[in-house]
Amino acid sequence: MTLKKYCEQNNLDQNKVFNMVLARGGDILPTVTAFTGYIAEIRDECLVCTNDKLNVFNKEIPFSSFQSAEFGIGSGQLWLQCIVDGNEFIFCSPRKSWKSPAAKLLLEKIGEKTEILSMKEYDKYTGKLFFIYMFK
């Protein structure tokens, strides 16, 4: 399901919903492949994740469970590498999604609980000179 369709069906503000591709985090959210997509609603105290293909609906991840977070770039993607309740939780999103109001809200919520390291990677990835940076 697309993010837009999900928001329409659930009467949600697209500025509070984030598209994520989970690379690691099977202890937190179910995965079937190395990269599993989720739609994550950003609420005041938690992320609410859904993957209709896996029949995962409204799985809550409290922001208070984020113990660390750090940006990194690999394979041309921006990854947020987190520790959540002692487990790895690593995800990426398309560049357009990282530049969205939803991404800014997500980072704000995580940042309230733990410092997000390597924010310069986020700034470079979402900045105007992205292509120059990526091909250095």
Image (cartoon, helix red, strand yellow):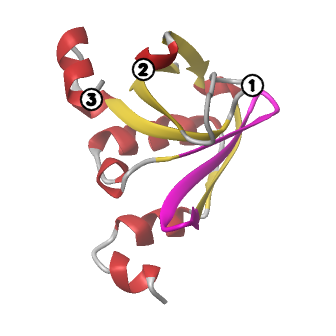
Amino acid on which disc 1 is placed: Asp
Residue 34: image x %, image y %?
A: 63, 42
Point out the stretch of residues depicted in magenta.
Answer: 73-91
Prevailing SS of the magenta stretch:
strand
Cα distance in 3D space between marks 2 and 1: 21 Å
- Residue 87 vs residue 118: left or right? right
* Residue at the spot 28% in from the left edge and 29% down from the top edge: 3
**Magenta residue check for 41:** no
* Residue at the spot 60% in from the left edge and 64% down from the top edge: 118
Mark 3 = which residue?
2
Amino acid on which disc 2 is placed: Arg
Q: For mark 3, give the secondary structure.
A: loop
Residue 22: image x %, image y %?
A: 57, 38
Mark 2 = which residue?
43
Q: Is residue 127 above or below residue 59?
A: below
The one of 23 and 64 positioned closer to us in this rendering: 23
Sequence-earlier tag: 2 or 3:
3
Cα distance in 3D space between marks 2 and 3: 19 Å
Q: Quadrant of residue 114?
A: top right
Residue 45: image x %, image y %?
A: 52, 19
Q: Is residue 62 above or below residue 70?
A: above
Q: Please tell me how crowded label 3 is: few (under 14), some (14-19), or many (20+) other residues with Cα within 10 Å.
A: few
- Residue 30 vs residue 45: left or right? right
Q: Is residue 39 above or below residue 72?
A: above
Amino acid on which disc 3 is placed: Thr
Mark 1 = which residue?
27
Sequence-earlier tag: 2 or 1:
1
